[in-house]
Amino acid sequence: MATDATGYIKHHLTNLTYGELPAGYERIDADGNVVNELTEATWTLARSGQEAVDMGFWAFHVDSLIWSVGLAILLMTIFGLAAKRATTGVPTGMQNFVEVIVDFIDNTVKETFHGNNPVVAPLALTIFTWVFMMNLMDLIPVDIIPKLFELSWAAAGNDPHHAFMKIVPSTDPNITAGLAISVFALMIFYGIKVKGIGGFMAELTLHPFNMKNPVVQAIFIPVNFALEVLALIAKPISLALRLFGNMYAGEMIFILIALMFSTGMALGMFAGVLQWAWAVFHILVITLQAFIFMMLTIVYLGMAHEDH
């Protein structure tokens, strides 16, 4: 039972990964038996979590990419339709819903961001809605889509044990790190654009210890630089890990609750109550995490626009 539970959890937490395996690599089946040895370096889908690890840095998490891009297209379609059907009269349900979100984001940016940049509000809207949609996938029962994918995978003549499908992109650190690095790049870009390269470097070398004596100031420049660079790098790392950690923990709880359904009627009924309660609470979590990611992005870009 413990082995089955471990396998169930590992299967649900493994991404559908596409990458390159080196020549001489021995591929094994679900029972640990060697199936074949690659005669040359081969790009292929991983058959296990270990193969995904062995593929290295340049492997792609296909499921995370498909779901994140698909949700982005869905959002663009919704907002595009709302814009095309917008009217000055009584708004429709979709128009009213979109206007509420846009007004909320716009007011939040006005209260938080004090620079002059027309990119910040649309960026904040994109981040909030996209991260929210990716988080929202966590409310879909953990077995539905993976099981459908497993059945279609088997119908195509493939081993169902190799059918991995994670549908919550924000539980993948590659996705959250990609978002955070994009925000970090904008921070650096606008920091240099607003302050100039000299002002940007001065901010890294003359704070927090800024002395009037030039000799003492020169002594503290390496200390200031080390402290400011660490603080700067910590921003995207905290952005990525905060979102990933919260969503990964939420997904893990859903998986553990799903395991309870196979332990008998009594625990199954209790699991149903737990699943409903956690889903209701998780609605707050997924919304809050999207809001926090958006707010920190606005704050960081606001700091990049501050010219002392």
Image: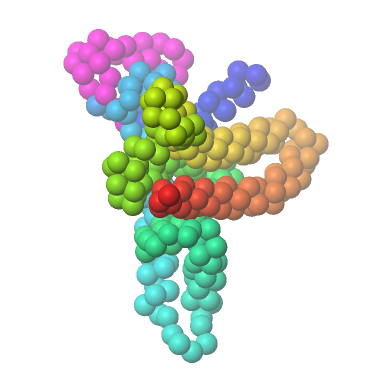
Q: Residue furthest bottom?
A: 89
From the viewer's perspective, tell me whether residue 6 is left or right of residue 73.
Answer: right
- Examine the rendering and report whether any part of residue 207 can be seen: yes
Does 17 appear above or below 148?
above
Q: Position of residue 214 (x, y in %)?
A: 39, 29
Q: Position of residue 306 (x, y in %)?
A: 43, 51
From the viewer's perspective, tell me whether residue 296 is left or right of residue 37.
Answer: right
Along the line of sight, which residue is nearer the eye, 98 or 30? 98
- Colouring of the image: rainbow
- Examine the rendering and report whether any part of residue 158 can be seen: no
**Residue depicted at 55% across the width and 23% down the height:** 7
- Give the image quarter of residue 61: top left
Does 98 appear above or below 133?
below
Q: Position of residue 30 (x, y in %)?
A: 45, 19
Along the line of sight, which residue is nearer the eye, 306 or 29? 306
**Residue depicted at 29% across the width and 47% down the height:** 196
Along the line of sight, which residue is nearer the eye, 283 or 24? 283
Q: Residue furthest front?
A: 213
Magenta stretch bounds: 18-42
**Residue depicted at 46% across the width and 32% down the height:** 211
